[in-house]
Amino acid sequence: MFDAPKIGGFGYGIGVSVGILLLITTITLASYFCTRNNQPPSAAPPQGRSNNSVDEVAPVDVEAGIDEATLMNYPKLLYAQVKAAAADRGAKEDAGNSLCCSICLADYKDADVLRRLPDCKHLFHLKCVDPWLRLHPTCPVCRTSPLPTPLAEVVPLARQQP
């Protein structure tokens, strides 16, 4: 009845080639848009270029460390004092806390000066934890922050230790 026109191998080849090119283009565009770095328009201009716009906002450091005055108010102790106080109380909770520094992993010696963080009571070598606290406002072990946060004002129980 009807004779269907026969498409030769050349027609199939063109169709497959166009399909493969469309597939590769789609994958390339999708990966470009999914992996590119989205910077807000208020970000600082690249180095070497200056933007004299008055409206430009400098990038904000989200995690600023503890200021020097606050850091100096944190208690300093000799390890011999900590060990004697734990032995006097018979406290088992200080046993794991007072064996070694969690930052440098060195065992404490009786003459070592330690800093006790106020909220979590973790102990560290003074020379190890002070640089950390100048950069980060949290305990290196439990991430408890001694600085007040809006959540602590709304939910006071969030800052209580069990």
Image (cartoon, helix red, strand yellow):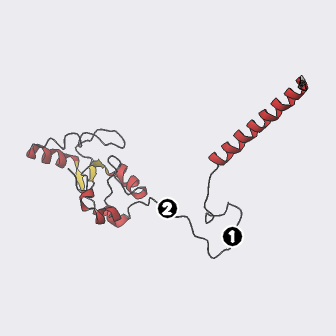
Asked whether the viewer can see residue 114, the reply is yes
Please give the name of the residue rendered at 74% of the width and 36% of the height, measured from the top-left corner. Answer: 23
Q: CA distance from mark 1 to mark 2?
A: 21 Å
148 relative position to 83: left or right: right
Q: Residue furthest front?
A: 1
Q: Is residue 58 above or below residue 110?
A: below
Nearer-the-camera pick, 47 or 86 = 47
Please give the name of the residue rendered at 83% of the width and 32% of the height, measured from the top-left corner. Answer: 15
Q: Residue 69 falls in which quadrant of the image?
A: bottom left
139 relative position to 38: left or right: left
The label shown at residue 113 is none
Q: Which residue is mark 2?
A: 61
List x then y, in percent, for residue 31: 66, 42
Nearer-the-camera pick, 107 or 98 = 98
Nearer-the-camera pick, 38 or 52 = 38
138 relative position to 14: left or right: left
The label shown at residue 51 is 1
Q: Are marks 1 and 2 in contact (CB under 8 Å)?
A: no
- The quadrant in which the N terminus is found is top right
Assign a secondary structure to mark 2: loop
Q: Is residue 16 above or below residue 104?
A: above
Q: Amino acid at mark 1?
A: Asn
Nearer-the-camera pick, 34 or 110 = 34
Asked whether the viewer can see residue 118, the reply is no
List x then y, in percent, for residue 105: 34, 39
Q: Residue furthest bottom?
A: 54
Q: Residues within 10 Å of mark 2 (few under 14, many from 20)?
A: few
Please give the name of the residue rendered at 61% of the width and 58% of the height, measured from the top-left corner. Answer: 39
Q: Residue 108 falls in which quadrant of the image?
A: top left
Assign a secondary structure to mark 1: loop
Q: Amino acid at mark 2?
A: Asp
Q: Along the polypeptide, which appears first: circle 1 or circle 2? A: 1
